[in-house]
Amino acid sequence: MAANPHAPNLDAANPLAPDWLDADVDVNALWPGLWSENTVRAADGEVVIAGVSSSQLVEQFGTPLYVIDEAHARNRAVEVREAFERELGRVGAKTTVYYAAKAFLCTEVARWVTEAGMKIDVASGGELAVALAAGVAPARLGFHGNNKSQAEIDRAVGLGVGTIVIDSLWEIERVAASAARQGVTQRVRLRVNSGVHAHTHSFLATAHEDQKFGVTIADAPAYVARIREQSSLSFMGVHCHIGSQIFGTAGFAESASRLLGLHAELLAGGPVPELNLGGGFGIAYTPADEPTPIGIIAAEIADMVAGECARLGIDIPLIALEPGRAVIGTSTSTLYTVGTTKDVTVEFDGTNAIRRYVSVDGGMSDNARPALYEANYSVRLANRVSDAPQRLVRLAGKHCESGDIVVYADYLPGDVQPGDIVATPATGAYCFSLSSNYNYLARPPVVAVRDGVARVIVRGETEEDLLARDMGVNPQQRNDGAPQ
């Protein structure tokens, strides 16, 4: 069916639509900031990712399905690294850019970001194991977390992990003792809370923080003195992370100003070669989002660091950063198959309004962010276009939870029906990483697409996988429970 970009919107006045959602849109169009660079709407109406149509992908791999535009992910990693190296180099600073593995990690992604010139930041023994399995040199890894086990510390030290981020007095002793036992000197940073909390376009600066990570600026000098007392430790600098999905640089500027003040104070006791400003740079999930371009972020951070160092009369340290979502987020879309639709009458401000629920074959098990954070996403028909009047929809999952929502509000053609394929963009960060087996759903496969070729980079789970660890299963039974 031919698309009509001016199809009437029957729900233009629907009071259930959030203020940020623009009703005057072409529901067949793909908003450029949300989709990967090689995702297009083809002449036949199909959403095509890096040369492979949605229908082809679903026929071959099923749904739900994570689809990564490989070239986009690789190019974005290079773009982010080069932006920070260029802008910090402009003010005379060196930089190290780590990929924050918690956003999304598998061996292929680890190889992509490493080949793009990034190091990798891991936060558990499992993430460390994946990076090592990908062939990443231990020296190119940073290891952080608020409660590293002794086994994780011993392994990291023994392998020669580049830097361990210290999070408590206990870790000073544990890392120092491990390094001494193994006859090495371990490079460490100290996690410090700057008192700046940032989210999207605003931030809050306080004197104290009530959180599990790090130590206060006021307490940091005592911690650093203790680190310096350990002959098996080499103090590299402080590390900070102020939040996630941040637009603009005001929060980073305030945090860096405070951290550089601490940095200058610490120089009196010995060298402080580095300052790690963390990550948290935001991306667009809906057309209403306006994330700051990475080049502008890099330039403003560079100018701020240079200006503050000049004011303090100190040399600019090596600046480390840890982007994750900003690298991988928009590389990926998730494909689902529609199972049912349902119109629900909702009483709102004394009137009745209709919300159309479109239920799909995944949900909070493959994207927990809407349930955890009320995060907004977008959705489009992926197997066709339509000139049917558009309707306000809520994309729901199949789990036994009323909060199992994938997309809280968007517009789709009113003829969306069972069997249609829908796609949600910008699912590269924290979707696979937070995926679960809730209701015993098998986690979906991850497919990388490039130049018209699709390949599985993480196999999807099966029911056999789900039962494999259940020790009550009779090994003589088939998967259907019938005796052999």
Image: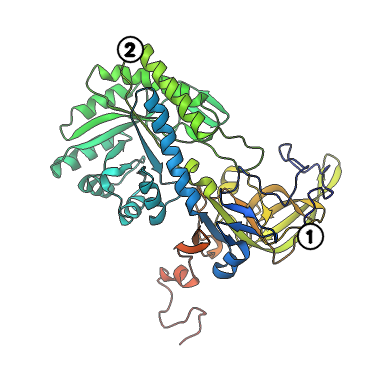
Q: How many marks?
A: 2
Residue 242 point in image, percent of width and height: 46, 31
Q: Quadrant of residue 258?
A: top left
Between 311 and 85, which is closer to the camera in this rendering? Answer: 85
Residue 398 point in image, percent of width and height: 63, 61
Q: State the mark number for residue 83.
A: none
Q: In the rendered view, would you say 98 is above or below 421?
A: above
**Outermost residue to the right:** 351
Judge the density around disc 2: few (<14), some (14-19), many (≥20) Cα neighbours within 10 Å.
Answer: few
Q: CA distance from mark 1 to mark 2?
A: 65 Å
Q: State the mark number for residue 313.
A: 2
Residue carrying label 1: 415
Residue 421 visible in the displayed image: yes
| Secondary element at image label 1 | loop
Judge the density around disc 1: few (<14), some (14-19), many (≥20) Cα neighbours within 10 Å.
Answer: some
| Secondary element at image label 2 | loop
Residue 31 point in image, percent of width and height: 66, 45
Mark 2: amino acid: Gly
Mark 1 / mark 2, whichever is N-terminal: 2
Residue at horizontal 50%, vertical 25%? 251
**Outermost residue to the bottom:** 484
Mark 1: amino acid: Asp
Residue at horizontal 34%, vertical 52%? 131
Q: Quadrant of residue 361?
A: bottom right
Q: Quadrant of the C terminus?
A: bottom left
Residue 108 point in image, percent of width and height: 40, 56
Q: In the rendered view, would you say 59 is above or below 43?
A: below
Residue 404 visible in the displayed image: no
Q: In the rendered view, would you say 406 is above or below 445?
A: above
Give left or right: position of 175 versus 474. left
Residue at horizontal 18%, vertical 40%? 177
Q: How is the image coloured?
A: rainbow
